[in-house]
Image: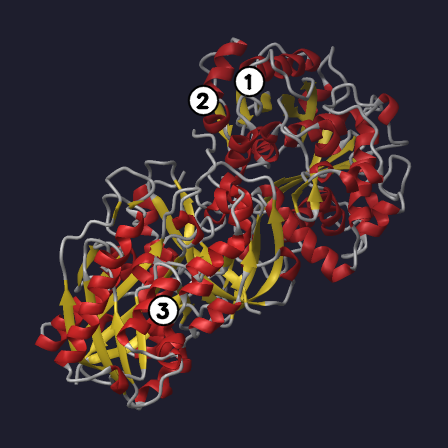
């Protein structure tokens, strides 16, 4: 049996409300909240980045996996907000967790699908017997330009998954990827903020790939939405995944446990994985979980998992997403702007 | 500022909170040393220090040294870990009013400082107050 | 070992001395000491300096001082022990004279701190702490002493107001010291309302950045007595140095400076004195809390009673034990490497009865306490009228 042996999440403590950002730009907060279905978003502290977030999430995953870090054969981080343009992130995390040096380590960039990408790859390596355990992490301190609609959602957070062949807490039943080059969102090298294409991000991009990938994996597993206990989708805002779940025929009960964007925001590569972590925080043995990620121009990965008895044994080895979600410190726009490096400081 | 080789050399302490324990008298220390400061034994083993402890004393620094200006004001505390080892740690993500002598803390992994826009980013331990 | 005396003293103005370089300051104080001693040659120089490298980008300073004094080719040695550089330089000069190796030794302390901006100065000073395990967490010197103050206030129910009494007293004393950096009288409220540097220490709880230099000439006591045109020699009857952990976190007790206790014990023993015999003390008040801990660790007050004693005026010039009549580091200024020597200069003036408005009545025995870092190095020196 191959699947998840440990999972962990982390989101920063600071939050900014949609009202606070809307007030800055003279926009209507209620309209925005109703449209985006996001109330507030996480903001990283000045000393947090996608590496520290990945570290904390992975540390939590290790606590649940109850394994010797030295047995991990691969560490991958998927992110759109690497602290360095050139210098790996995953080596820092692998070193700090005591996983190095006999380990394959790499950073992935694949738009918001980079996180699920790492899980997909370590799953393959583990299943083939090439490595005993593999650690895949999605972590981001998402960028959104001031006054851009993206600014209301671009958040920080991450989740980590250790895959293995024994002591599995959620078995992989099927995987499926659906990919085309559909350029609805990108960030050119050297640019601080991404560019997106408005309505084009919807039907031909997010929905086309998400729906086809989810349908593909269910078909492969010979399942229908009725067989699925929980569904999780990529969450660029609160509205897109809700609409996707409805279009696929999922109910509120199936969808809501993995719907984290309304109170976390869009954590880019962390999104769908945080949703999965949130579902694992409550799932019971034999529950079936569908996860479909999405990355702009990157397509969608889908997984179907079946939860095992072991999940409940290790769940409380590390904090649940609720723990992090409930610890909050609200900041105003000025503090947010400073924390996100939008205030031009003196450079020595 | 701290140079790259120096920080690289300190990775066991900075990244993994490695400390020392005297096999003769049991004294625990951060960082590990060649000689036990209590009994002069050279029989020191490297150990993983616990990541929980309590605040022995603390301050909030408003006037920061070069390299830390972006973080001020920030809290710093002397922390005693559960095995007795003591170390200096910044206390982050915690309202200053919630920092008190005796409060429980746990160690987190954060950026310690950044050498300008083009320089290295140094990571290491800080602590948060456990609510 | 020969008895050793201070024969000449020299000190510059302390403060922001924009026009003067470290060389100007060191030469000025040294020449004053040499001239006031009546000697025409010196055998050796010790220079106390903390961080020429970071403050003025100059190491190897001792040779420069010998050169600029016109005493080329004699040995000249720089001593660095953080804020105790001056006190430690004095002890080495003492040993050189006491041993018979040299007869006339110049000890100068100097620091030029204002050529850098404050954050750079704070950074330089932080190098006197444990760089790898304190500095990398962003701990400053005010921060270290704030950790001490927080614990002291917690353990002994001391108040910020009591700490402030140290600053008020030392500013009052400094106002009558023409060489001091500050001549303004301050109130308890001024101290309490000043901006916080490191909680609970505010601006007025901290000694300032200061430029300045101080010098003394040491000679064997018996030879000093024979000098025809010098001022009265003052005997160094006790001098001792001790260490403690450089990292504050490694101490069992954050409010007791063990190095002060150890150095004081040795110095008292060497001089055959006890704390009760001291008529005047210059102690290392780099922060208000430091003076409070010092007067306890030196044996003038019980542990935990120093704050109240200060508030009650027991350390005023006319108090039970006058502490820092010069204004101390707080009022007079704290040019780091010069401080330990400036304390000796101030005490010699007291013991010669030349301290003018700051004179302590009938001062016969004086004590200097010079502390480096957060107490990892301490020197205690006892001076006596012969």
Label 2 packing within 10 angstroms: few (<14), some (14-19), many (20+) = few
Front position in the image: C326 or A171: A171
- The disc, 2 or 1, on the residue closer to the chain's N-terminal end is 1
Would residue C133 be found to the left or right of residue A303 on screen? right
Would residue A87 be found to the left or right of residue B30 on screen? left
* Nearer the camera: disc 1 or disc 3: 3
User: Which residue is under mark 2?
Assistant: C58
Q: Residue at x 56, y 53 (%)?
A: B76
User: Which residue is under mark 3?
Assistant: A242
Establish if C306 lies above or below A6: above
Query: Is mark 2 in CB contact (under 8 Å) with mark 1?
Result: yes
User: Which residue is under mark 1?
Assistant: C22
Q: Is residue A17 visible?
A: no
Establish if B119 lies above or below A216: above
For the image, the number of numbered tags is 3
**Residue C267 image position (x, y, % from top left):** 68, 44
Q: Chain of mark 1?
A: C
């Amino acid at each position: 049996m191959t699947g998840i042996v440990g999972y962990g999440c982390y989101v920063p403590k600071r939050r900014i409300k949609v009202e606070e950002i809307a007030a800055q730009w003279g926009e209507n907060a209620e309209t925005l909240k109703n449209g985006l279905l996001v109330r507030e978003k996480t903001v990283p502290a000045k000393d947090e980045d996608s590496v520290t977030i990945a570290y904390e999430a992975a540390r939590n995953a290790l606590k649940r996996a109850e394994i010797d870090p030295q047995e991990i054969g691969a560490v991958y981080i998927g992110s759109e907000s690497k602290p360095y343009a050139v210098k790996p992130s995953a080596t820092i995390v692998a070193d700090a967790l005591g996983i190095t040096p006999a380990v394959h380590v790499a950073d992935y960039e694949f738009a918001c699908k980079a996180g699920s990408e790492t899980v997909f790859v370590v799953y393959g390596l583990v299943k083939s017997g090439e490595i005993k355990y593999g650690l895949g992490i999605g972590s981001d301190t998402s960028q959104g330009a001031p006054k851009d609609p993206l600014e209301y959602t671009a958040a920080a957070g991450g989740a980590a998954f250790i895959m293995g062949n024994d002591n599995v807490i959620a078995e992989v039943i099927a995987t499926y990827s659906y990919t085309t080059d559909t350029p609805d969102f990108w960030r050119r090298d050297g640019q601080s903020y991404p560019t997106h294409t408005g309505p084009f991000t919807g039907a031909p991009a997010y929905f086309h790939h998400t729906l086809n990938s989810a349908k593909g994996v269910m078909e492969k597993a010979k399942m229908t939405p009725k067989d699925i206990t929980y569904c999780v989708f990529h969450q660029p805002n609160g509205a897109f995944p809700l609409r996707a779940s409805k279009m696929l025929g999922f109910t509120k009960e199936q969808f809501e446990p993995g719907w984290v964007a309304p109170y976390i925001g869009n954590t880019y590569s962390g999104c769908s994985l945080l949703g999965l972590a949130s579902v694992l925080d409550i799932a019971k043995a034999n529950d079936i979980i569908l996860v479909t990620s999405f990355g702009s121009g990157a397509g969608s990965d889908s997984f179907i998992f079946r939860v095992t008895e072991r999940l409940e044994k290790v769940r409380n080895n590390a904090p649940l997403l609720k723990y992090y979600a409930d610890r909050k410190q609200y900041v105003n726009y000025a503090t947010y702007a400073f924390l996100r490096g939008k205030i031009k400081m003196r450079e020595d | 500022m701290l140079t790259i080789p120096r920080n690289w050399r300190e990775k066991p302490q900075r990244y993994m909170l490695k400390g020392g324990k005297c096999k003769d008298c049991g004294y625990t220390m951060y960082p590990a040393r060649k000689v036990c400061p209590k009994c002069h034994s050279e029989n020191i083993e490297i150990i993983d220090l616990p990541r929980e402890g309590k605040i022995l004393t603390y301050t909030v620094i408003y006037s920061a040294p070069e390299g830390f200006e972006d973080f001020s004001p920030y809290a710093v505390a002397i922390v005693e870990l559960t095995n007795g080892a003591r170390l200096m740690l910044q206390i982050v993500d915690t309202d200053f009013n919630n920092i008190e002598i005796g409060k429980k803390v746990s160690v987190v992994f954060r950026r310690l400082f950044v050498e300008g826009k083009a320089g290295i980013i140094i990571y290491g331990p800080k602590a948060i107050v456990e609510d | 070992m020969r008895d050793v005396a201070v024969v000449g003293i020299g000190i510059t103005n302390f403060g922001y001395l924009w026009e003067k370089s470290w060389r100007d300051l060191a030469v000025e104080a040294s020449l004053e000491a040499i001239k006031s001693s009546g000697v025409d040659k010196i055998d050796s120089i010790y220079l106390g300096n903390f961080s020429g490298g970071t403050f003025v980008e100059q190491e190897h300073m001792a040779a420069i001082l010998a050169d600029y004094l016109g005493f080329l080719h004699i040995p000249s040695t720089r001593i660095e022990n953080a804020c105790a550089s001056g006190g430690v330089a004095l002890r080495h000069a003492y040993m050189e004279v006491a041993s018979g190796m040299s007869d006339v030794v110049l000890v100068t302390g100097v620091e030029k701190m204002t050529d850098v901006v404050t954050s750079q100065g704070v950074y330089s000073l932080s190098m006197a702490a444990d760089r790898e395990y304190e500095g990398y967490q962003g701990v400053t010197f005010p921060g270290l002493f704030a950790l001490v103050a927080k614990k002291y206030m917690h353990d002994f129910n001391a108040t910020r107001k009591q700490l402030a009494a140290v600053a008020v007293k030392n500013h009052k004393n400094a106002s009558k010291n023409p060489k001091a950096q500050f001549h303004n009288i301050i109130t308890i409220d001024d101290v309490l309302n000043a901006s916080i540097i490191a909680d609970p220490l505010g601006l007025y709880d901290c000694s300032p950045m200061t430029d300045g230099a101080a010098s003394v000439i040491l000679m064997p006591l018996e030879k000093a007595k024979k000098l025809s045109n010098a001022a009265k020699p003052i005997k160094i009857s006790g001098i001792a140095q001790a260490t403690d952990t450089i990292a504050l976190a490694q101490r069992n007790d954050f409010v007791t400076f063990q190095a002060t206790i150890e150095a004081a014990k040795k110095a008292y023993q060497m001089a055959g004195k006890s704390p009760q015999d001291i008529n005047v003390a210059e102690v290392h008040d780099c922060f208000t809390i430091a003076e409070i801990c010092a007067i306890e660790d030196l044996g003038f007050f019980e542990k935990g009673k120093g704050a109240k004693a200060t508030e009650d005026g027991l350390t005023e010039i006319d108090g039970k034990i006058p502490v820092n009549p010069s204004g101390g580091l707080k009022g007079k200024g704290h040019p780091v490497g010069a401080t330990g020597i400036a304390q000796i200069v101030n005490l010699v003036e007291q013991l010669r009865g030349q301290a003018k408005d700051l004179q302590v009545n009938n001062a016969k025995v004086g004590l200097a306490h010079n502390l480096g870092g957060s107490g990892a190095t301490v020197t205690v020196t006892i001076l006596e009228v012969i």
